């Protein structure tokens, strides 16, 4: 009887320990991805609204200063690009959760690298647009 109890306990411990650090279920990943996509879309929409308001304010204040307007537009485009990049990064990280440990790590590294590249590209575009 003790052997059966010890064996059952051992099997239960192995089952519990093997469940750690496993990929999320497909439905959980799908829900997380959907939530991340919705959050990213809202963030992009908010950035667009803010950029539009900034553009309108700059136009009203400095009709004869196209330089100021150009800089505000460049900043607004930068903000929208960053919001898109961060949203895509969040979605990519959620998708990475469906992968096993090694693939998940590589996936997250790639997502981080893509975010860094998008930020650098957006900054370069903003600097080039400003005079």
Image (cartoon, rainbow, N blue to C red):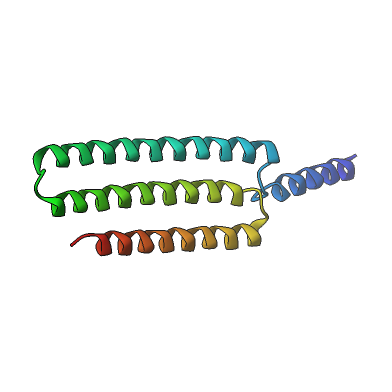
Q: Quadrant of the N terminus?
A: top right
Residue 109 vs residue 118, the one in the foreground: 118
Q: Residue at x 57, y 40 (%)?
A: 33
- Residue 106 vs 65, above or below: the answer is below
Q: Position of residue 16 (x, y in %)?
A: 72, 44
Residue appearing at x 16%, y 40% in the figure: 59
Asked whether, in this view, residue 39 is left or right of residue 92, the answer is left
Q: Position of residue 62 (x, y in %)?
A: 9, 44
Q: Is residue 15 above or below residue 103?
A: above
Q: Residue at x 41, y 62 (%)?
A: 116
Q: Within the image, what quadrant is residue 41 found in?
A: top left
Q: Measured from the top left, where is residue 94 in percent x and y?
A: 56, 46
Q: Residue at x 27, y 41 (%)?
A: 51
Q: Is residue 104 left or right of residue 47?
A: right
Residue 90 vertical position relative to residue 46 in the rendered view, above or below:
below
Could you say which is closer to the camera, residue 70 or residue 115?
70
In the image shown, does 101 or 116 lie closer to the viewer?
Answer: 116
Q: Quadrant of the C terminus?
A: bottom left
Provide residue 128's location: percent of width, then percent of height: 27, 64
């Amino acid at each position: 009887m003790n052997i059966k109890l010890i064996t059952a306990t051992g099997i239960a411990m192995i089952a519990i320990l093997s469940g750690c650090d496993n990929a999320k279920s497909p439905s959980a990943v799908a829900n997380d991805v959907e939530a991340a996509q919705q959050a990213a879309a809202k963030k992009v929409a908010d950035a667009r609204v803010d950029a539009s308001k900034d553009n309108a304010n700059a136009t009203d204040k400095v009709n004869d200063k196209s330089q100021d307007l150009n800089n505000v537009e460049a900043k607004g485009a930068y903000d929208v690009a960053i919001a898109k990049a961060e949203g895509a990064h969040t979605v990519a990280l959620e998708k990475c959760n469906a992968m096993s440990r090694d693939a998940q790590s590589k996936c997250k590294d790639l997502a981080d690298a893509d975010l860094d590249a998008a930020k650098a590209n957006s900054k370069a575009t903003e600097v080039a647009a400003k005079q």
